Amino acid sequence: MAFIHDDFLLSNSAARRLYHEYAEAEPILDYHCHLPPKDVAENRRFANLFEIWLEGDHYKWRAMRANGVPEELITGAADPKEKFAAWARTVPYTLRNPLYHWTHLELKRYFGIEELLDGANAETVWARANEQLAGEGLRAWGILKRFDVKAVCTTDDPGDDLAFHTQIAASGLATKVFPTFRPDKAVNVHQPEQFNAWVGRLGSAAKLDITDFRSFLAALKQRHDYFHKLGCRLSDHGLNACFASPCSETRASEIFERSRAFLPATMDEQAEFASHLMLFFGRLDAEKGWTKQLHLMARRSNNTRMLEKAGPDTGFDSIGDWPQIDALGTYLDTLEREGALPKTILYNLNPSWNYAFATMAGNFQGGPVAGKIQFGSGWWFLDQKEAMEWQMNALSNCGLLSRFVGMLTDSRSFMSYPRHEYFRRVLANMLGQDMERGGWAFKR
């Protein structure tokens, strides 16, 4: 039997029935990902297996480093085929890492390749995959069609002109592709050089001269309005922890002006400024009926030497451990008291905080929206079988699993769509085990 078979991860008859009869054929709504809009707009054709599979994939890069692969074969200037061969030699060592499952799911679903990848068959896998990549079916649009992707929400900076989204909307592509408003750089007053360069980009995109804090807010609102015009209904924030320090507009303006004069904000001042902006963004989202996403607890760019060498988002991030709940509760409560709390998804990267997040979500539920505040799916280091089960168990015990918004790819790769299959199999198996044990009764 092939490793990836019809009943992969499905341990009993109830699980198999749930997956094959209900979950398997459902379309994909990829409501949070990092796919480049340019690749979609241009219907990218991938030249080889490295481009579609290893380019930008820091999950694989981390495994290769742990296996002793030189950086030249990871983010360096080595030949793409050599980099792929180094990954193939690493795959057998990923046993019990989710990469082992994902790798073989992806090889089978995209290329029909069922053998286990290793250094010995790297050459033939490379050739077989590249032959198929030359066809139309594995260009960007072909992949979206193959996996029945109904909608994609990319992650976009307010300073982006969204030209590629405009191009996609006019292209006739069956998959709907929408931007997501991700204003993380708006709070970086502690890094004035980067902040001021970004403010310049923001002003250009908004076609506004940003001369003070009020015109800064006006530019952000203008971009928020423009994103909405192009179909955006989601915002997203990648934060160490939620911000909720008291800060008046006058105080925020003072901090802004100092950063504009290239005087870095202190840690406390940056927290005050970010708190003021997060309330501003929450009100904008609520006014337009958007859903806010909060991605919390990632400790980024830990290895400063490699940050300088390879840049950010290259595999040197990990789980953080900041106090979360007081600030998160204060933030949500402040918006709730104003009648300005939008629909919200809380994503937690540290599993020790799962129950705290799940119970916090329950504090702000209410009609007419079922599941208004979501405890979001396991993400980044937690988007694998065990951690998905942890997240769903916490949600089940403290809330309503039946109102769960479900899985996403959170990926930069067009090869990640089998992660939806993976999640569905894990969910079906979890519920199937409950059914077989007799712990729950389900009425049709």
Image: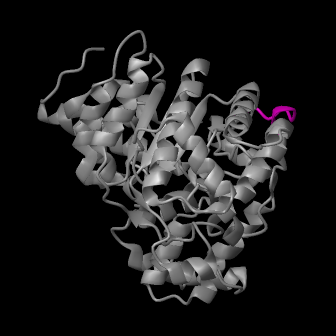
Q: Main secondary structure of the magenta part?
A: loop
Which residue is pictured at 67% across the width and 40% down the height? 213
Which residue is pictured at 54% across the width and 68% down the height? 58
- Residue 344 found in image quarter: top left
User: Is residue 433 or residue 381 the one in the foreground?
Assistant: 381
Q: Is residue 105 visible?
A: yes
Q: Is residue 28 visible?
A: no
Q: Is residue 11 left or right of residue 171?
A: left
Locate residue 317, reporting x and y percent. 46, 67
Colour scheme = one colour
Q: In the picture shown, does residue 80 fall above or below 334?
A: below
Q: Is residue 103 magenta?
A: no
Q: Is residue 18 left or right of residue 342?
A: left
User: Is residue 261 or residue 245 the one in the foreground?
Assistant: 261
Which residue is pictured at 60% across the width and 42% down the height? 253
Locate residue 382, reporting x and y percent. 37, 54
Locate residue 266, reporting x and y percent. 48, 60
- Residue 23 found in image quarter: top left
Q: How many marks?
A: 0
Quadrant in the picture for the C terminus: top left
Quadrant in the picture for the N terminus: bottom left
Q: In the picture shown, does residue 110 fall above or below 49?
A: above
Q: In the picture shown, does residue 14 fall above or below 160?
A: above
Q: Which residues are magenta?
A: 168-176
Query: Going by the picture, which residue comes out furthest to the top?
Result: 368
